[in-house]
Image (tube, grey):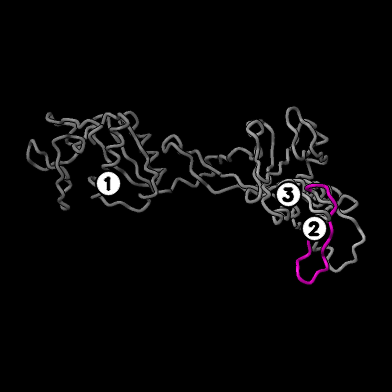
Amino acid sequence: MVQYRYGMNSSGVVVTADSLAGTIIEDTFTCLGCEQPLIARVNGKVQQPHFGHKPRVECSGETYLHRLAKRVFQETYEKCLETGEPFTIAFSTPRICGKFKSLTGQYCELGEDQHEYDLTQYYTDLRVETRDGQFIPDVSLHSKKRPDELIYIEIAVSHFLSEAKENSAKRIIEIPIRTEDDIEVIRAAKLTPKNASFKGFFPEVGVVPDAECRCANARLFAFYVFESGKAYIDEGPLQRLHSKVQNLGAKLAYVNIVTDDRYRNAVDAFDRSRGFLFRSQIELAYRREVPIKNCYLCRYHGDHWNASSDKSIFCKTYKKPCQSNQAAECDRYRLIPVNEL
């Protein structure tokens, strides 16, 4: 036989079986799922307090949870309105800085702003299953000062937001309810992204003023390609790299700030001229159709791994070591097709 922890008493209030343990039962109880009479089995010595159906009936657990959660939300919210206690929603939004976005191509992350709102301060009218245009939300919260502003409260047991609601401009709080234990989330009167989903609530991401930027001293790598086709890697604070790019101006054909976390630690001079970071940036620029000329892209290049020299290329036509940027002045330079890299 189906056993539930919650039932509705004769006054229409949801009660728990645990709250009735050790008492003389004089009230009557109804199932929130099938609306049939329940028996409060709360004084036994073997089983935990629970409600059971008087006759054996087919009762949908899904319907029971959905109606239970909806009713508990109504009772909890109305109690908050009566007592002045808050019913809050809390979430965070990222803070970002766009001071160097023109150089790096992305915002810098500066942590998060915390937001918490007491819904009862704005929405003092609660309605259950009241039509709003094409939709009938489980519960809707209304503002008396701004009648057009409302919030849908949707209880999700197994069916979540419809595509139409998801794509609407409505503010929606969806509360997933999988077991009776989840009801306590509603009773706690505080919803967060851990126990509910919010649609249409979050304020826009907070872009801080340039004066509050904390990114200037972040050390990053910059890969430059000059109009001549020559390339090199620089490392330093973001502010210095930004100033350098501005000073070089039209001399540069391409700039890429390396934000990959693999290169947060220092890379030595050897790697800057011939290592993975340098060579990967050369290939990336070539694939982006940047007019780069580098021996690593020449079909006649070979590696010259002599750590005591900055000449990282062995030219197979001239049969001698050279710097990779000598391709910019080489009359025997032959570009490898991009599909052969």
Dot 2 or dot 3, earlier in sequence? 2
Residue ID at (82%, 65%) = 42
Residue 46, position as x, y percentages in the image: 76, 70
Quarter in which the C terminus is drawn: top left
Where does label 3 land, which residue? 65
Quarter in which the N terminus is drawn: bottom right
Q: Secondary structure at mark 3?
A: helix
Which amino acid lies under the numbered mark 3 shown in the image of this protein? Leu
Q: Do labels 2 and 1 touch, CB within 8 Å?
A: no
Q: Which residues are magenta?
A: 33-52
Assess disc 3: are there few (<14), some (14-19) or many (≥20) residues with their C-alpha within 10 Å of its C-alpha: many
Residue 100, position as x, y percentages in the image: 45, 38
Residue ID at (36%, 36%) = 245
- Marks 2, 1: nearer the viewer: 2
Residue ID at (25%, 49%) = 271
Exactly how many numbered labels are in the figure?
3
Residue 89 horizontal side relative to residue 110, left or right:
right
Please tell me which residue lies in front, 335 or 311.
Answer: 335
Residue placed furthest toward the front = 56
| Residue 48 among those drawn in magenta | yes
Please tell me which residue lies in front, 144 or 36.
Answer: 36
- Marks 2, 3: nearer the viewer: 2
Disc 2 from disc 1: Cα separation: 69 Å
Q: Do labels 1 and 3 touch, CB within 8 Å?
A: no
Residue ID at (25%, 32%) = 339
Which amino acid lies under the numbered mark 2 shown in the image of this protein? Gly
Residue 224, position as x, y percentages in the image: 31, 37
Where does label 2 land, which residue? 52
Assess disc 1: are there few (<14), some (14-19) or many (≥20) residues with their C-alpha within 10 Å of its C-alpha: few
Tag of residue 110: none
Where does label 1 land, which residue? 276
